[in-house]
Each structure stands twice: as C-alpha cells, then as structure tokens.
Image: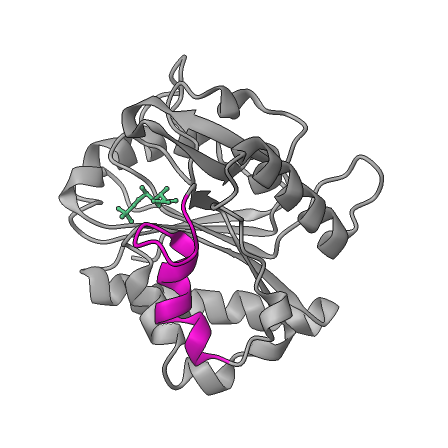
C-alpha cells in the first residue's frame, strides 16, 4: 500500500522499470499494455522524466493498450492521447512500436479484430495460442471493472478472441478491450488503484469470500504470471490485512 498518489506512482515506476529491464534482458524486448483513466497519469509522468527516461530500454519496448474508448486518437477521451501526451512523446520509443487500438473505426468489431491480428503479428503465438505480454497495467473502477471489462458484460465470457468490442450500457457506447484470456496469459499484471471510491470494490476483490458473480477485476489471475496490487491509503482503507504482493 502506498500512502498517497505520489507514493503510488513511485512504487509503480520502480516495478515497471524492473519488469521492463528483466524482459529485455530475457528476450531482447519488452511488451507492455498501458491502462487508461486518470490513475496511471502519475506513473506516466515519472516514466517520462529522469531517471526513467534515460534508464529504461525504450528502443526495445513495444507499447499496447489494455482498452480504448471508441473515439479518435486526438479525442479528449482517448487513452492513446493521454499516454502519448504524458509519456510516449517524451521517450525514444520507435513509432512503429507504439501499437494503438483504432478507436476511430466506425465498426468497433472490425477494430477489435484488427487489433487481434496485430497482436498475433507482433507476438506470433503458437497455433491457437495467445499473446503473452510482459506487463499489463490495469486500473479498477468503483464498480470493480478493469480495462473495459464491466460487471455483467458478455466480454467477460469471451474465451478465444484476444480483443473484443464491448457495448457499455452505462456509458452508452462501445469500448475496445483485451479479454480475460489475454490478461491471464500475461507474465505480470500491475493494478493501480487510488481513491476512497475504490475502497469497497478493492475489499470485495481482495478479501471477500469467492462470490457467485465475482467482480471483473477479481477474474484477473494469470495462470503463469504475477498480479501486483498497488493501492493508496484511501483505496486500501477497508482492507483488513496487508496483501502479499502489495507493497506496504
Ligand atoms: C479506462 C480504463 C479503466 C480505468 C478505470 C479506473 O479506459 O478508463 O481502462 O478501466 O482503469 O475506470 O479509472 P481511473 O484511474 O480514472 O479511476
């Protein structure tokens, strides 16, 4: 648990750096899916500045997104735009290694299928296999959603496609999102959660007895990977015990 948003960003930056450095040492590249929303902004700001700007192997790093709103890359709601403005324009990642979801496509299902083909081209998984990302950054909403996997969404039941277009009733719009099979194929998942409004969902995800209908964030459990929860004191205020894997 981190005391506040600044401490959360610092802990996340150090973990991000370690994972990326180990991935490049292991395979010659690092593959990271970025999260949208507001919580990761502090992390992205730190990564765009020294020492991380010079320290990290950006030229060997590929960036993806865990989800995207169905808007263009210049739209204020775009997760791509947020990451590009705060991080990607400030570090030497080759443009061809920035793999944007095409939220502007008027056919979200086509955009999802295109991104699935892009993932296959970059990862070249064995036949029938799934892309195995080195790191997936995730946030969590107050309702326990993560990426654009919302409670009750049919996308939660996807077992083969790596990316789907999900219609979100509450938002009255589509989102593009990685699916649970891809998230649970990852080497490492890092959740960043901040704010008192997340406290109830965080306790339900981390400490409640297994419910009949688990919150989406609780369904993220890589079969051969790690999950780290980084939460600030406000988000963690209802937790009864420190979590293994969640820095105290
Ligand atoms: C998005 C994210 C979404 C986000 C949560 C938390 O596109 O908005 O993928 O899952 O991580 O809604 O958002 P905040 O960080 O803004 O609280």
Q: Is residue 184 visible?
A: no
Q: Position of residue 192 (x, y in %)?
A: 34, 52
Q: Is residue 114 visible?
A: yes
Q: Quadrant of residue 99?
A: bottom right
Residue under the point 66% across and 72% down: 24
Task: State whether residue 163 is above or below residue 235.
Answer: above
Total residue callouts:
0
* Picture quarter with the C terminus: bottom left
**Residue 80 magenta:** yes
Residue under the point 49% across and 47% down: 66
Task: State whether residue 178 is above or below residue 98.
Answer: above
Magenta stretch in the rendered image? 71-91
Residue under the point 47% across and 79% down: 91
Q: Position of residue 185 (x, y in %)?
A: 63, 42
Residue closer to the observer: 143 or 189: 143
Ligand 1 occupies quarter: top left
Residue under the point 68% across and 69% down: 29
Question: Horizontally, is 207 left or right of 195 in the view?
Answer: right
- Residue lying at the far front in this picture: please name it: 106
Q: Position of residue 35 (x, y in %)?
A: 42, 52
Q: Quadrant of residue 23?
A: bottom right
């Amino acid at each position: 648990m981190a005391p506040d948003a600044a401490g959360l960003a610092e802990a996340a930056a150090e973990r991000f750096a370690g994972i990326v450095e180990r991935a490049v040492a292991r395979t010659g590249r690092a593959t990271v899916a970025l999260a949208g929303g507001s919580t990761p902004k502090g992390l992205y700001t730190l990564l765009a500045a020294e020492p991380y700007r010079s320290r990290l192997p950006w030229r060997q790093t590929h960036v993806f997104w865990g989800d995207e709103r169905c808007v263009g890359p210049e739209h204020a709601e775009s997760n791509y735009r947020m990451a590009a403005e705060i991080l990607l324009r400030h570090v030497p990642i080759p443009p061809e290694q920035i793999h944007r979801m095409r939220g502007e496509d008027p056919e979200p299902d086509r955009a999802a299928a295109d991104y699935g083909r892009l993932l296959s081209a970059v990862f070249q998984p064995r036949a029938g296999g799934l892309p195995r990302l080195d790191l997936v950054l995730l946030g969590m909403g107050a309702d326990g959603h993560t990426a654009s996997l919302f409670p009750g969404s049919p996308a939660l039941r996807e077992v083969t496609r790596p990316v789907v277009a999900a219609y979100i009733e509450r938002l009255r719009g589509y989102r593009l999102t990685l699916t649970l099979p891809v998230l649970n194929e990852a080497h490492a998942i890092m959740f960043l959660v901040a704010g008192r409004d997340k406290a109830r969902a965080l306790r339900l995800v981390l400490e409640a007895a297994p419910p009949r209908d688990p919150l989406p964030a609780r369904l993220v459990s890589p079969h051969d990977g790690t999950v780290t929860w980084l939460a600030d004191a406000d988000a963690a205020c209802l937790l009864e015990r420190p979590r293994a894997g969640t820095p105290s």
